[in-house]
Amino acid sequence: MVDLPFNPLKRAREVEELVMEGLARKYYRFRPARYYAGIATADIVGCPFPCAYCWKYGRNLHPEMSRDRYYSPHEVANRLLSVVKRRAFNKVRLNGGKRILHYPS
Ligand code: SF4
């Protein structure tokens, strides 16, 4: 068993409280990205892990500071599809946080 400096399950529940409202989740932007020959990207708010090398370390460390809004899964899909159509991409991704928060139990 690995000794972690924090409890990831407890931290996941805490982050969930801060970034979820029912099935809606906080996102801070939807964008085209040049990676993978072009991919529609939704940037999530909230991750239970405090990886020091993460490009959004500060935002993940303090999700309560975020003024970003909540999006339903349907809204997220529509926004990503809008980027796909506008840029003629064929890929999407959810980025910068853990997608598995709020997994139904
Ligand atoms: S998004 Fe990935 S790299 Fe960033 S803190 Fe979470 S697990 Fe770590």
Image (cartoon, grey):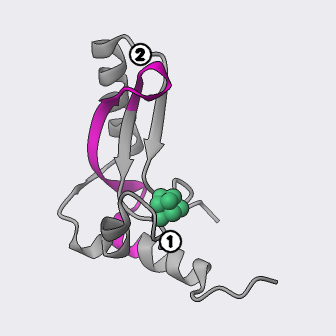
Residue at the limit of the structure toward the top, as seen here: 88
Q: Which residues are magenta?
A: 17-40
Residue at the limit of the structure toward the left, as seen here: 67
Asked if the residue at label 1 sits under 8 Å from ligand 1, the reply is yes
User: How far across and how far down the image is residue 77, in percent?
Assistant: 40, 32
Q: Is residue 21 left or right of residue 94?
A: left
- Identify which residue, 23 or 9, lies in the foreground: 9
First in sequence: mark 1 vs mark 2: 1
User: How far across and how far down the image is residue 41, in percent?
Assistant: 38, 35
How dense is the environment of label 2, judged by Cα within 10 Å: few (below 14), some, or many (20 and up)?
Answer: some
Question: Is 67 rendered above or below residue 39?
Answer: below
Residue depicted at 60% across the width and 78% down the height: 9
- Work out which quarter of the rendered image holds the C terminus and state it: bottom right
Question: Is 31 rendered above or below residue 91?
Answer: below
User: How far across and how far down the image is residue 30, in percent?
Assistant: 29, 38
According to the image, label 2 marks what residue? 89
Q: Which mark, residue 88?
A: none
Residue depicted at 30% across the width and 22% down the height: 82
Q: Is residue 8 left or right of residue 86?
A: right
User: How far across and how far down the image is residue 54, in percent?
Assistant: 43, 61
Q: Which mark, residue 48?
A: 1
Residue 102 seen in render:
no
Q: Is residue 80 left or right of residue 11?
A: left
Secondary structure type for disc 2:
loop
Tag 1 near tag 2, CB within 8 Å? no
Secondary structure type for disc 1:
loop
